[in-house]
Amino acid sequence: KNKIMGANDVNMNSRPVRHRSPFNSIKFFVFCHSLLQLAQLLVSGYMKSSISTIERRYGLSSQKSGLLAAFNEVGNTVLIVFVSFFGSRVHRPRFIGGGALLACLASLLMALPHFLSGPYEYTDRISSTSSDNSSGLCQSESVLTTSSSNQSCSEQESPAQQVVYPLLLLGQLLLGIGAVPIQPFGISYIDDYASKKNSPLYLGILLAVTSIGPAFGFITGSMMLRFYVDFDKFSKDQIELTHKDLRWVGAWWLGFLVASCLLFLTALPYLFFPRNMPKEDDQGEDVESRPDSKQQKTDPLQELSLLQFLKSFPRIALRTLRSPIYLLVVLAQVNLAALLAGLATFMSKFIERQFSQTVSFSTMMIGGICIPLAVLGTVLGGALMRRFNLSVSGASKLCFAAILLCMFSAMPLLFIGCPTQRVFGVHPYSSGGMSCSAGCQCPNEAFNPVCGSDGVEFRSPCHAGCITMETDVNNKAINYTDCRCVGGLSFASPGTCGSGCSRLLLPFMALLGVTSFIASFSQTPSYIMILRTVPAEDKSFAVGVQYMLFRVLGESRSLHAHGPVLYGSVIDTTCILWGKKCGKQTSCLYYNLDGFRHRFLGLQVVFVCGGLLCFLLTVVVLRRRTRLQEPQQTSKGGYELVNEEKTASKEKEAKGIKT
């Protein structure tokens, strides 16, 4: 009898037990969403950490590699607002899960070019079939090298090789489409069902954890790029290059396979989250009250057809953008997004070139120092919002102070660096100086840097006029001798001379880390300002408009050019020697380091100033609004600037559209 009673008790209490399921907890949703964005942004961070390697592997310019890095924004820009507008009308968790699965497939597609293309070819390997000039020394004739080079060119022009760049672009496009529902739906879902007190903390945690995603991407890139790109095609003994060689290409494709597995695993929980979740306990609010009331408010708009939506879209977008606070905060974020686009995509390349470091070490500096400090700043920004229960006005002042300090810490970076190393016949340029190696018949495509005993760098042993070389037991060159173009002792060592600037890496990274830490303080307060200055039903749409403006404004500061493309174009203008292969221009071999530093970092300072101006205007507008609305001021936790009249007018507008 007791057993039967116990069974009845279980049946009677089945509904409350179901409500206590982890899939009905906003805390568990925040946990799952953090893991998903961690995996999704890992792919993004990994792509940016590998971009200079992909550039070198397939002979791309910085502009082309920048286009590749930014191409995921194409699908994002087109779809983000539409998906966000329908955010309150669809099953948001399932849309998030579907987007994650699409991103998983896109990540697999990104790795595909490695398996379609042949082995990586570089100068010595191109001429390796020639027994006479496999070492690249100065010779009077080079007949066999030409035939070998022609053979390599025919392989380079094969259909499999030509499809590589379009495949990478397609993968990035699908990755952007898959990412469309993830952040807007996630942020609006959390803000809908979290208590007002905990919402800033949850968003701070979410933004901080998602900031770790690119950090993991850069750290993963640092580990993967230590493996040779074709380690699956050659044995260890057949790999001749070392990490410090400027021709080294790491296993860029390996991280995409790892990321696709993580995306698949983190997408699965979203199939089990409900469409409407019980609101987090705040003041004993009924579990079903919020979803029901929300459903009532959105009913008029839910009945809109796609055609009606397209007709009403400009009016709704205009209403959202009419809020000066919303518009100014988004424009400030646009400037900071453009700043981050350059830092994330090309800062590791900058460190590699400016301070003569390896690719893997440079990516580790970004992923191991800058991003973790930015995460810490994001968490502290959210914690300050919660601790002092800051209003929108207080949040704007916090953002302004953070970006002002950021500008002061960023300015000295322009002056930390060294001039370009001396490269014979390249920098400083002199056409007459090449006469010493004129009889060597050096191929234009040769690139195997050596450092002369007089401190001058040469493109290859042939360009240095070296006749003989010394090898170790493994038949690898350790020294080149009898070099006609080298002064003094007339010998040269394999590898670049470097910029001689490695001693300045520590102060540079310290300042860069401080700048990242301070700038990230504005992240959580600015998101809260956006969410608290629009009607509740427009949250998904407002976040979507914000993301669209990121793409349209923050990443297109020049005609037809997204952010990374702009940075890539600026970097390309500082190139002083382009590589050549099969008569076509490939990636840059040498940069003017002073020009690289001033133009690249100068562009960052411009964006910091833009963000500072927008936050300053936000403070001014809020101060004027406070003076005009003093009688209507709310109590200490006055987050919201939206009143019920806006919601009512919105419903009337929707009914008008229907009719």
Image (tube, grey):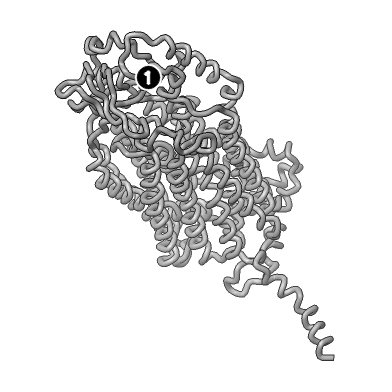
Classify 196 as above or below 256.
Answer: below
- Residue 629 visible in this rendered orientation of the protein: yes
Q: Is residue 331 visible?
A: no
Extreme residue toward the left, this view: 488
Q: Which residue in the rendered view is the most extreme toward the front?
A: 473
Q: Quadrant of the N terminus?
A: bottom right
Q: Is residue 262 above or below residue 340?
A: below
Q: Residue shown at 51%/34% (left/top)? A: 234
Q: Secondary structure at mark 1?
A: loop
* Nearer to us in this view, 81 or 71: 71
Task: Tell which of 306 and 603 is nearer to you.
Answer: 603
What residue is shown at x 69% (from left), y 46% (from top)?
Answer: 654
Residue nearest the observer in this picture, 551 or 273: 273
Residue 574's x, y, as percent? 33, 25
Residue drawn 37% across the image and 49% down it:
370
Q: Position of residue 196 (x, y in %)?
A: 54, 64
| Amino acid at the residue labelled 1 | Ala
**Horizontal and vertical percent position of residue 115:** 59, 33
On the image, numbered disc 1 is attached to which residue?
A: 446
Which quadrant of the view contains residue 479?
top left
**Quadrant hosting residue 239:** top left
User: In front here: 15 or 423?
Assistant: 423
Q: Quadrant of the C terminus?
A: top right
Q: Up-down: is 315 above or below 66?
A: below
- Number of residue marks: 1
Q: Residue at x 71, y 48 (%)?
A: 301
Q: Label 1: how many residues lie within 10 Å, few (<14), some (14-19) or many (20+)?
A: many
> In the drawing, does residue 264 fall left or right of residue 514?
right
